[in-house]
């Protein structure tokens, strides 16, 4: 990465290494802390003198110490024009104000650094004659789902619809039901998880429970229990990043298959060898978190009446349930 010049856009970041931080290489630490960063890009920035530790340039191999202050200056590549792409969409409903799409797992909602093509927005631009203005590069997008979470999203086609829907998200009157397969058996058939959430100080790509975080509330209800897995229905009272995934991991029931929050460890199934092998085989059926936004309900911006849409579970989640119900490997 070449040094910046005065007319190039820059991102300036500062990291105060917390007490208790494990001692790791500087390039590894920054790869964890800088969103969408790769180790190669971090190493290039370090080599170009764009990373200072306590005011001094260091090598990539420098061992990060608790109390270090790391200053990073990174180039922001200009975002390319967002152009329509002919990508198939599963449209559940559409009128002249909005549409509801069933997003497949693996699709990014809107363009961002390292994801400038193949997003839901690119597909929407090809499909719809008009979309609301929204944020730059995000026409029509009122809310989003994680890349590997499947399910329903409402998309605004007019600015009026966008503002009307956004108010409902802001006051938490939107109805959102998720279903998830999680590790373990719940102690109670239903419950509420209240735990504030914030970006992790050790890995900025993750979210963690933190006393000084933003309030977050998730309700759950057991739909079906199995020897070492449970199918849950979940309702969000808030819409924090990774909320369901972090809340469930926090109470010891990570979402099955979740690579970020401990959901791909077959040891959650117990110590019995046969059961562990069963879990390993089930994990092979789904490469992502078993989480689906199944239902969305809102007041329609034109008709003024409550409108609700639902979708079936995707094939990968159904495959896991079919196998676990049959008790087959």
Image (cartoon, grey):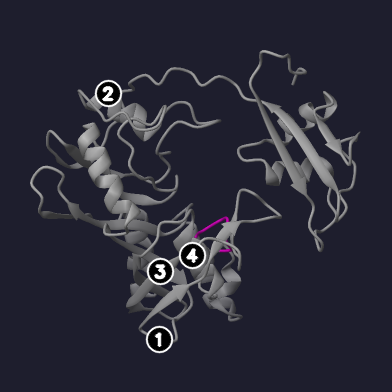
Mark 1 secondary-structure assignment: loop
Tell which circle, 1 or 4, labels the residue nearer the N-terminal end: 1
Tell which circle, 3 or 2, labels the residue nearer the N-terminal end: 2
Q: Is residue 276 visible?
A: no
Residue 188 disc label: 1
Q: CA distance from mark 3 to mark 4?
A: 10 Å
Give the residue number, with chain letter if any, for mark 4: 215
Which one is in front, 219 or 93? 219
Mark 4 secondary-structure assignment: loop
Region rendered in magenta: 255-262
Q: CA distance from mark 3 to mark 1?
A: 15 Å
Front label number (1 vs 4)? 4
Residue at position x 37%, y 67% in the image: 323
Mark 3 secondary-structure assignment: strand
Q: CA distance from mark 1 to mark 4?
A: 23 Å
Circle 3/circle 2 CB separation < 8 Å: no
Is the residue 252 above or below the residue 51 in the image? below
Dot 3 alpha-carbon crowd within 10 angstroms: few under 14, some 14 to 19, many 20 or more: some
Dot 4 alpha-carbon crowd within 10 angstroms: few under 14, some 14 to 19, many 20 or more: some
Residue at position x 14%, y 48% in the image: 300
Front label number (3 vs 2)? 3
Query: Quick check: is 260 in the magenta stretch?
Result: yes
Residue 218 disc label: 3
Residue found at the very far bottom of the displayed protein: 187
Is the residue 127 above or below the residue 287 in the image? above
Please state the horizontal and vertical placement of residue 218, each as a whole percent of the image: 40, 69
């Amino acid at each position: 990465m070449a040094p910046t010049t005065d007319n190039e856009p820059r991102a300036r970041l500062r990291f105060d290494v917390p007490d208790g931080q494990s001692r790791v290489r500087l390039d590894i630490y920054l790869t964890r802390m800088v969103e969408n960063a790769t180790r190669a890009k971090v190493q290039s920035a370090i080599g170009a003198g764009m990373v200072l530790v306590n005011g001094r340039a260091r090598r990539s191999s420098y061992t990060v110490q608790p109390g270090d202050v790391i200053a990073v200056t990174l180039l922001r590549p200009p975002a390319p024009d967002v152009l329509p792409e002919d990508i198939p969409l599963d449209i559940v409903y559409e009128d002249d104000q909005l549409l509801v799409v069933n997003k497949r797992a693996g699709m990014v909602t809107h363009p961002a650094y390292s994801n400038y093509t193949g997003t839901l927005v690119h597909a929407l631009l090809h499909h719809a004659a008009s979309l609301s203005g929204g944020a730059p590069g995000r026409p029509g997008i009122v809310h989003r789902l994680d890349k590997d979470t499947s399910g329903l999203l409402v998309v605004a086609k007019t600015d009026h619809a966008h503002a009307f829907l956004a108010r409902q998200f802001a006051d938490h009157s939107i109805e959102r039901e998720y279903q998830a397969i999680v590790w373990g058996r719940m102690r109670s058939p239903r419950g509420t998880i209240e735990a504030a959430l914030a970006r992790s100080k050790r890995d900025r790509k993750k979210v963690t429970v933190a006393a000084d975080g933003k309030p977050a509330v998730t309700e759950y209800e057991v739909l079906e229990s199995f020897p070492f897995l449970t199918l849950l229905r979940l309702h969000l009272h808030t819409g924090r990043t990774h909320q369901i995934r972090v809340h469930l991991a926090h109470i010891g029931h990570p979402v099955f298959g979740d690579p970020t929050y401990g959901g791909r460890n077959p040891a959650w199934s117990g110590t019995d060898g046969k059961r562990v092998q069963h879990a390993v085989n089930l994990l092979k059926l789904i490469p992502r978190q078993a989480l689906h936004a199944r239902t969305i309900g809102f007041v329609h911006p034109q008709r003024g009446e409550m409108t609700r849409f639902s979708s079936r579970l995707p094939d990968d989640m159904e495959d896991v349930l079919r196998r676990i119900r049959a008790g087959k490997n």
